[in-house]
Image (spheres, grey):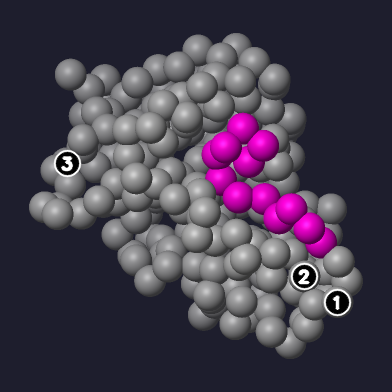
Amino acid sequence: MSASPNFDDRPDATPIDMLVLHYTGMESAFRALDRLCDPKAKVSAHYLIDEDGMVAPLVDEGMRAWHAGVAFWRGETDINARSIGIELVNPGHEFGYRDFPDVQMAALRDLALKVLDRHPIPARNVVGHSDVAVGRKTDPGELFDWAGLAQAGIGLWPDRENNDGDPARVPVMLADYGYDVTDEAAAIAAFQRHFRPQSLGGPADALAAACLSALLDLRNT
């Protein structure tokens, strides 16, 4: 039985092949849980992970939780239909964005590995809300440890980076990787937030192009 009423059936024959990670962006865990379980809010996720590492199951994985909203990844737009959504308690950029505690990230690693065992989710499809909702969302944000997750076998992280990439090819490579590039600047910002947080707000330079090239080499893993 689901703790949140905010879900519906997944479409027939739609695979669960994405894992989307979020932060709650609210003042407290209590407020976040209350909203995710409020039928008037019409938002939810499959799991909520508190900063102390406690995992709260909210929606059965077999059902479609309402977490991604208007989104796009690799040509797909009904991201909720094909994804598992995990919310991590964090006040977010509006209420005092901060580091994700080690115990919270450890709980996420344990949960995500179990999700990946249950569903055919390629590493390329482990994404943040900001990756699938470019220009609209910023979570889980630039403080999130994507590299550490990849080291644990969750998602991708470029294993090489040099400075010989071609910046002119960045929009094409972003689209090839999966991003919606209708707004190129927003897509570049989303990519930088995930893979090059130290360059957040910076241009799509040769280093960004080299990073994307490395990711494209890894995309089928």
SS at circle 2 = helix
Cα distance in 3D space between marks 3 and 1: 47 Å
Cα distance in 3D space between marks 1 and 2: 6 Å
- Label 2 CA crowd tier, 10 Å (few <14, some 14–19, many 20+): many
2 and 3 marks in contact (CB < 8 Å) = no
Compare residues 200 and 167 and report the one nearer the observer: 167
Does 56 sit above or below residue 183? above
**Residue at left 47%, top 29%?**
113
**Which badge, 1 or 2, comes first in the chain's sequence?**
1
**Residue at left 14%, top 43%?**
9
**Which badge, 3 or 1, comes first in the chain's sequence?**
3
Residue bearing mark 3: 8
Q: Is residue 28 left or right of residue 215?
A: left
Q: Of the numbered discs in the image, which one, if any, rests on residue 128?
A: none
Main SS category, magenta section? loop
Disc 2 or disc 3, which is closer to the eye? 2
- Label 3 CA crowd tier, 10 Å (few <14, some 14–19, many 20+): few
Does 175 sit above or below residue 217? below
Q: Quadrant of residue 115?
A: top left
Residue 210 locus on image (x, y percent): 77, 70
SS at circle 3 = strand
Cα distance in 3D space between marks 2 and 3: 41 Å
The residues colored magenta run 150-161
Q: Quadrant of the N terminus?
A: top left
Q: Of the numbered discs in the image, which one, if any, rests on residue 210?
A: 2
1 and 2 marks in contact (CB < 8 Å) = yes
Residue 204 locus on image (x, y percent): 77, 74
Residue 34 locus on image (x, y percent): 38, 23
Amino acid type at circle 1 is Asp
Residue bearing mark 1: 164
